[in-house]
């Protein structure tokens, strides 16, 4: 056997995590608890406010979901029966439609495209939207080709090109009516071909996060994640978040036209018709990795209205905000945002199975997509049945889970707001809804402590604060991925008052240390950690 003891998976990441004390090995999990293996071999219980980055609305290893999983495995349920009917997947889509009709106030049917992760659901959304755009573009070009043919027929009957059209599109008139008209038509065809061949326009928001795969990473705002892979796919156009005026500006600056010949008596003129260059507009109702930033109702309304005007589908990314976390199944329901596409993952399968789904409104759905997109593990018999059980739990008793998420979220938010009020020099903001909350630490670049100021300058303050809370207070939080001064709070609906109080106690200790530039307290755990 090879005696090489090098770590072969994420060694660099783990080394960086170790520097902040965030690399324990967790050996058990239940509810809102994780147990870390201590250096003496014992187990240390930690309250988990990270919640699988939003995957654990029902907590770690929810007994009812685990029992269902055990039952399915014991019954030898077919997991892999690809290229067959999968009624369990259809049942999941049916429940999601019922919820969408109730919460979003729409009567549209949504078709389901299943995948394994949130990023894959985003990739499927991009692919489907681009197929739809391509088919719309082809239909428009076919219509224009028919009009061009009629214009050439008219040329044979003595029709001439409009003088205004010749001048507008850079065709020098020679006096030869047939030649001039043919030159105009050729110029229009060339320009249309160039427009059709251009990369699609995808709009998304500054601060947004939609995954790290080759296509989805182009939609993720953080340049550290995106720029190394910028040549792999069409880049996105980023729109400032909650800046309603910027939406129309973005569309107008990216819009394009196709040139459509029109025979008008014995003259051929050219009309400019909108070209379907917009693939999709992506938006999270609450930006997760961008710092727990909710979209405003005004902004959501502008996205919907302007996107519809430019025939651009809206993709609502509910991967982190959805599945009940905000007090409703769809966070978009709080701001009236109805997506042509909706992506879901994380808590959809109870934190036990890996499952995501793309929902596509019937008005946009292209059946052809089913023949060109597939995935071995998508809509497998195990994960879809687990999702069906999870949805049953969530919808039970008139949505008691959603009410619990709202109530526990208010209790947690109250604790965070209390810390903010008492430590304004340490806490800049508290944001979010339900059990998707963020506490933003103030910039500490001017701290009298060189270590604290240096941590801020290196963009690791949020990680060191998380390490302090973990080792000194047995509370697990982490910064958001693209706004590292914002601590994420995404516990389960079972989070207790006692655990929230423990978090508040730890945060008060953090804020006092930041206020007092007390690096000995804040960073002392690095030399005394026991797990």
Image: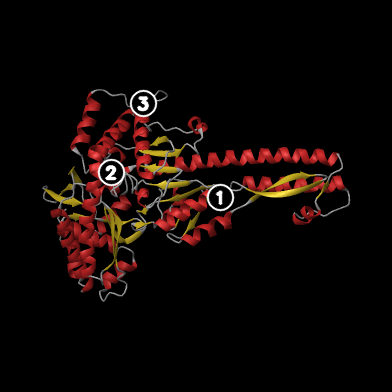
Name the N-terminal-most of marks 3 and 2: 2
**In front here: 119 or 409?**
409
Find residue 514 and report its image quarter.
bottom left
Count neighbours of disc 1 (C-alpha within 10 A) and say few if under 14, some if 14 to 19, many if 20 or more.
some
Location of the N terminus by quadrant is top left
Q: Which residue is mark 3?
A: 87
Count neighbours of disc 3 (C-alpha within 10 A) and say few if under 14, some if 14 to 19, many if 20 or more.
few
Count neighbours of disc 2 (C-alpha within 10 A) and say few if under 14, some if 14 to 19, many if 20 or more.
few
Mark 2 element type: loop
Q: Which residue is mark 1?
A: 310
Residue 264 horizontal side relative to residue 306, left or right: right
Where does residue 97 sit, x and y in percent of width and height?
38, 36
Residue occupying the point 52% across, 47% down: 312
Residue 376 horizontal side relative to residue 326, left or right: right
Find residue 167 and report its image quarter.
bottom right
Is residue 158 in view from this perspective?
yes
Q: Which residue is mark 2?
A: 4
């Amino acid at each position: 056997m090879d005696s090489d003891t090098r770590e072969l998976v994420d060694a660099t990441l783990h080394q960086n995590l170790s520097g902040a004390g965030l690399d324990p090995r967790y050996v058990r999990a239940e509810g809102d608890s994780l147990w870390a293996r201590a250096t003496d071999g014992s187990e240390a219980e930690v309250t988990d406010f990270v919640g699988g980055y939003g995957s654990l609305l029902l907590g770690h290893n929810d007994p009812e979901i685990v029992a269902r999983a055990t039952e399915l495995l014991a019954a030898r349920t077919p997991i892999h029966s690809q290229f067959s009917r999968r009624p369990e997947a259809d049942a999941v889509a049916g429940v999601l439609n019922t919820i969408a009709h109730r919460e979003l106030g729409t009567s549209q049917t949504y078709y389901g495209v299943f995948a394994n992760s949130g990023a894959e659901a985003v990739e499927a959304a991009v692919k489907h939207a681009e197929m739809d755009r391509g088919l719309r573009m082809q239909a428009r070009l076919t219509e224009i080709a028919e009009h061009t043919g009629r214009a050439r027929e008219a040329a044979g009957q003595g029709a001439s090109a409009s003088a205004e059209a010749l001048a507008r599109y850079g065709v020098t008139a020679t006096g030869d009516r047939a030649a001039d008209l043919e030159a105009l038509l050729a110029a229009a065809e060339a320009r249309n071909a160039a427009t059709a061949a251009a990369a699609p326009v995808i709009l998304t928001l500054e601060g947004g996060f939609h995954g790290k795969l080759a296509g989805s990473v182009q939609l993720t705002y953080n340049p550290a994640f995106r720029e190394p892979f910028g040549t792999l796919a069409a880049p996105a156009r980023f729109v400032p978040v909650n800046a309603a005026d910027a939406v129309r500006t973005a569309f107008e600056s990216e819009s394009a036209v196709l040139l459509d010949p029109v025979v008008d008596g014995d003259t051929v003129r050219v009309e400019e018709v909108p070209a379907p260059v917009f693939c999709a507009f992506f938006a999270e109702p609450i930006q997760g990795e961008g710092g727990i930033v909710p979209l405003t109702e005004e902004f959501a309304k502008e996205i919907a209205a302007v996107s519809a005007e430019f025939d651009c589908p809206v993709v609502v990314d509910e991967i982190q905000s959805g599945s009940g976390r905000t007090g409703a199944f769809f966070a978009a329901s709080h701001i009236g945002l109805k997506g042509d596409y909706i992506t879901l993952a994380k808590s959809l399968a109870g934190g036990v199975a890996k499952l995501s789904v793309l929902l596509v409104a019937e008005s946009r759905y292209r059946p052809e997509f089913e023949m060109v997109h597939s995935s071995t593990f998508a809509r497998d018999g195990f994960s879809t049945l687990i999702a069906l059980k999870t949805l049953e739990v969530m919808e039970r008793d008139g949505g008691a889970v959603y009410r619990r998420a709202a109530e526990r979220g208010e209790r947690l938010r109250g604790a965070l707001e209390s810390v903010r009020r008492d430590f304004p020099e340490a806490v800049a903001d508290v944001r979010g809804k339900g059990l998707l909350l963020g506490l933003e630490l103030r910039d500490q670049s001017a701290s009298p402590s060189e270590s604290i100021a240096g941590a801020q300058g290196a963009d690791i303050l949020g990680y060191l604060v998380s390490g302090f809370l973990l080792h000194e207070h047995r509370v697990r939080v982490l910064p958001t991925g693209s706004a590292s001064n914002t601590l994420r709070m995404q516990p389960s609906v079972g989070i207790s008052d006692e655990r929230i109080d423990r978090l508040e106690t730890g945060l008060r200790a953090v804020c006092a240390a930041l206020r007092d530039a007390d690096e000995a307290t804040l960073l002392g755990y690095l030399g005394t950690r026991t797990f």
